């Protein structure tokens, strides 16, 4: 199971752009040529319908095609440079991009002129479909796979509903909230300025629903549980979907799991009413792990899954699930993910499309204490590739980080890593805290050296998750 790709369609006139000034200028120029006094204000009050329909009350039927052609010829000189983007338009498109989505514009406007607007305003659009109106928009929306269509007119609502897409309406056109709701729109926003926040909540709802459906279909799971934000959310979601009798948590105990993480993790899992298993794992005995090559995480995850698989079978639990999220899946070099997949582990968070930010947002929504828990990778991740991983090295890293946190107490520290580079400890703290006051830095480094390092230095670049991979 994998989350459906995000594709959002937007109308153009009065949704992304304020067409009124330019449209009015073109009408005046056309009227002057045809010697017709168009009621410009009235005609631009509810833009959206095809041009032929707007011209019909004021011209003979036979004259409308030629008048429409001339309108489109005049348009570039009168209605491109003067037409601005509506408030929030660029931000709305950027919000779709931020979630890895595609953007399509489906409009009743003449395609060449629509393209001129997009290019002039720098809109980042994957596909433009012009000269479609009302329910006629549905074919383009379906073809592009749009699941959301944003417009300002009741006929945009018709197009969205005919396509089976969620209809989002903005009040920047001529239609009222009541008219749009009466047409069947699902959501009404004052403007596109509200769209990014709405999209965040909408996608979180969709992905949590997908997560619940996935877990329900599994019947029972053993969650590979580290106590971090990802596995804590997965465990809570599994209990919600399946009930505590069909879920267990398993935390592999070894030298690579900091002592300080163990009790809080166990307490949280027990608060959900699930059994907590703490099998010992012996990744340190695997040559590929202790050698600490770039594929160290492969051997760690292989050990964990080979321990948890039989435990799940003994308890009649159908699957072992890991807390891999959607960001992990695209984060580049992740040999541990490959090892888990080879051993049949499922990844419900990843499959539902939940990103790290969404894991934290969902955890906060559910009141989980891990919603703002800093990332806490295993202690071995602090040891430079090629430097042998030993219990002694892991112990001194843990002592050094405890000393460093104590030295920085009260400064608002969030993320901290002490990287073991051999004889040197490189200390990474939140970049916003740098540079440290000289007396604070001196105390921090003294504590790190006291933990067993010959030398220590603060990395001026600050904390970077996975910084050891930069050398690969």
Image (cartoon, rainbow, N blue to C red):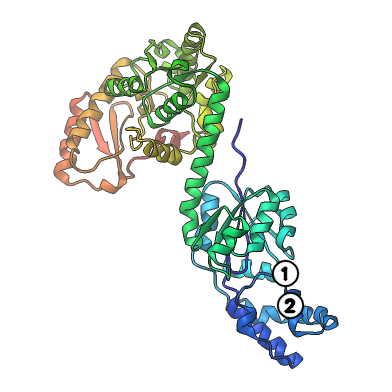
- Residue 171 at x, y percent in the picture: 53, 65
Q: Earlier in the sequence, mark 1 or mark 2?
A: 2
**Image: 320 above or below 21:** above
Q: Is residue 30 visible?
A: yes
Q: Is residue 288 visible?
A: no
Q: Secondary structure at mark 2?
A: helix
CA neighbours of label 1 inside 10 A, class few (<14), some (14 to 19), many (20+):
few
Residue pictured at 20% horizontal, 38% vertical:
408
Residue nearer the viewer, 275 or 293:
275
Instruction: Describe residue 251's horizontal placement relative to residue 400 as left or right.
Output: right
Residue nearer the viewer, 245 or 347:
245
- Residue 110 at x, y percent in the picture: 73, 70
Check whether the beta carbons of the residues at disc 1 and disc 2 lie within 8 A of each other.
yes
Spatial distance from mark 1 to mark 2, Cα to Cα?
A: 9 Å
Residue pictured at 58% horizontal, 75% vertical:
83
Q: Nearer the viewer, mark 1 or mark 2?
A: 2
CA neighbours of label 2 inside 10 A, class few (<14), some (14 to 19), many (20+):
some
Residue pictured at 37% horizontal, 39% vertical:
364
Q: Secondary structure at mark 1?
A: helix
**Image: 283 above or below 129:** above
Instruction: Describe residue 236's horizontal placement relative to residue 202 as left or right.
Output: left
Q: Return the residue at label 2.
A: 72
In the rendered image, the quadrant that contains the N terminus is: top right
Q: Return the residue at label 1.
A: 112
């Amino acid at each position: 199971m994998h989350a459906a790709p995000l594709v959002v369609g937007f109308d153009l006139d009065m949704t992304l752009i304020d067409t009124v000034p330019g449209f009015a200028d073109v009408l005046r120029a056309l009227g002057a040529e045809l010697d017709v006094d168009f009621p410009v204000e009235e005609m631009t009050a509810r833009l959206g319908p095809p041009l032929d329909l707007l011209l019909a009350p004021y011209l003979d039927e036979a004259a409308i095609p030629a008048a429409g052609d001339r309108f489109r010829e005049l348009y570039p000189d009168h209605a491109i440079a003067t037409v601005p983007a509506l408030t929030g338009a660029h931000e709305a498109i950027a919000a779709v991009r931020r979630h890895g989505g595609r953007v399509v514009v489906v409009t009743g406007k003449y395609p060449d002129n629509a393209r001129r607007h997009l290019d002039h305003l720098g809109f980042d659009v994957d596909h433009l479909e012009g000269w479609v109106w009302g329910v006629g928009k549905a074919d383009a929306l379906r073809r592009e796979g749009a699941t959301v269509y944003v417009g300002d007119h009741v006929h945009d609502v018709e197009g969205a509903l005919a396509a089976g897409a969620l209809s989002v309406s903005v009040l920047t056109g001529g239609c009222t909230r009541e008219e749009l709701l009466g047409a069947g729109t699902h959501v009404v926003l004052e403007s596109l300025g509200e769209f990014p926040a709405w999209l965040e909540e909408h996608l979180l709802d969709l992905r949590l629903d997908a997560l619940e459906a996935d877990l329900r279909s599994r019947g029972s799971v053993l969650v590979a549980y580290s106590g971090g934000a990802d596995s804590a959310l997965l465990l809570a979601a599994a209990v919600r979907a399946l009930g505590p009798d069909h879920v267990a948590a398993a935390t592999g105990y070894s030298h690579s799991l900091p002592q300080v993480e163990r009790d809080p993790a166990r307490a949280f899992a027990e608060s959900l009413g699930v059994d907590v298993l703490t099998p010992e794992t012996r990744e340190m005995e695997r040559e590929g792990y202790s050698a600490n090559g770039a594929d160290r995480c492969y051997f760690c995850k292989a050990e964990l899954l080979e321990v948890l698989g039989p435990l799940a079978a003994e308890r009649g639990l159908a699957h072992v699930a890991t807390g891999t999220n959607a960001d992990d899946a695209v984060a580049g070099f992740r040999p541990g993910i490959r090892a888990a997949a080879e051993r049949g582990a499922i990844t419900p968070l990843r499959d539902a499309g939940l990103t790290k930010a969404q894991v934290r947002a969902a955890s906060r929504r559910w009141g989980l204490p891990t919603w703002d828990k800093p990332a806490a990778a295993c202690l071995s991740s602090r040891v430079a590739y090629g430097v042998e991983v030993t219990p002694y090295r892991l112990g001194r890293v843990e002592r050094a980080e405890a000393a460093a946190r104590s030295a920085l107490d009260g400064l608002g520290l969030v993320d901290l890593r002490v990287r073991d580079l051999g004889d040197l400890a490189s200390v990474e703290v939140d970049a916003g805290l740098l540079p440290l006051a000289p007396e604070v830095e001196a105390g921090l480094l003294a504590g790190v050296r006291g933990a067993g390092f010959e030398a220590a230095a603060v990395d001026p670049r600050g904390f970077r998750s996975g910084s050891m991979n930069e050398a690969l």
